[in-house]
Amino acid sequence: MTDARPQYDAILRFHDALHAHYGPTHWWPGETPFEIAVGAILTQNTAWTNVERAIDNLKAADALDPRALLARGDEELHELLRPAGFFRVKTKRLLHFCRHLVDHYDGDMARLAARPMPALRRELLALHGIGPETADDILLYACDKPVFVIDAYTRRIFSRHGLCPPDIDYHALQALFEAHLPRDIHVYGEYHGLIVFVGKDFCRRSPKCDACPLGPLLDPGQPVLS
DNA sequence: GGCCAGGACACCA
DNA sequence: TGGTGTCATGGC
């Protein structure tokens, strides 16, 4: 996304470095909007490999559908979702989302996605168990709404490079990305995918900065982005 | 065997 | 309003 404009900056440079290293990520994994929404809820504070197991369980049980999920008992869902961790709370959150989808949109994600922004975002945030990141995952990847997803990797990577404070507010960092990027769901989706990739490979709590495509950490000091 | 992972919420001062 | 505890499995 090389850009000759003078405001070509850290956010664009990081994108270009990551894209050069990884190429297209085709993020987010999921065959349908509903599967993407389920993944967004299940991946809360959880490694994606564990989420995949739970989604595979749902598919094998023919339960990856809002009405099918609502028809299952809690005990059965606990067993299906167990590999994703926090299975009791995630069962409850998933059922809340399905109940809302069925009651207001006939279980149809396309009808949910047809709602305008920002009302749709407020609606998702009002659901129990859906916070800013989960809502934005669903909005961007399942509803094709142009919102940039901020996650722990985003905050960690950009703060370690001295580009923002480590405790920066979710919406403040989101606004920075959205102000510096083209308002395009494919750009937003790919960039978040690149951040997930580099986060998993290099920027865990014990970072492996030596081979990181973003290069050495900058001198922290005053954050560049504000 | 311990640490850690792509959050969200309840509770308390 | 901000800090802390809770939820749980699987990989390394």
Image (cartoon, coloured by chain):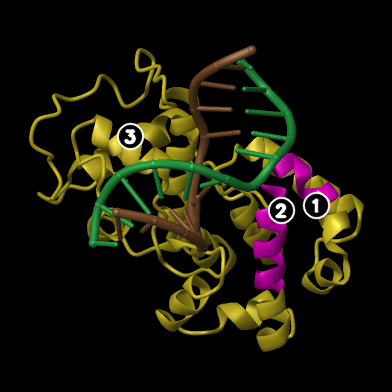
Chain colours: A yellow, B brown, C green
The magenta span reads: A79-98
Q: Which of A206 and A175 is in front in this view?
A: A206
Residue at 39 percent across and 15 percent down: it is A211
Foreground disc of the pair 3, 2:
2
Whether label 1 touches label 2, CB < 8 Å: yes
For residue A139, above or below residue A83: below
Q: Which chain carries label 3?
A: A
Q: Can residue A36 be seen in this view?
A: yes
In the picture of the structure, the residue carrying the numbered disc 1 is A78
Residue A97 colored in magenta in the image: yes
- Identify the secondary structure beneath mark 2: helix
Which x, y percent locates residue A98?
71, 72
The reply, left or right, for residue A208 in relation to residue A181 is right
In the picture of the structure, the residue carrying the numbered disc 3 is A157
Mark 3 surroundings within 10 Å by alpha-carbon count, few (fewer than 14), some (14 through 19), many (20 or more): many
For residue A211, above or below residue A90: above
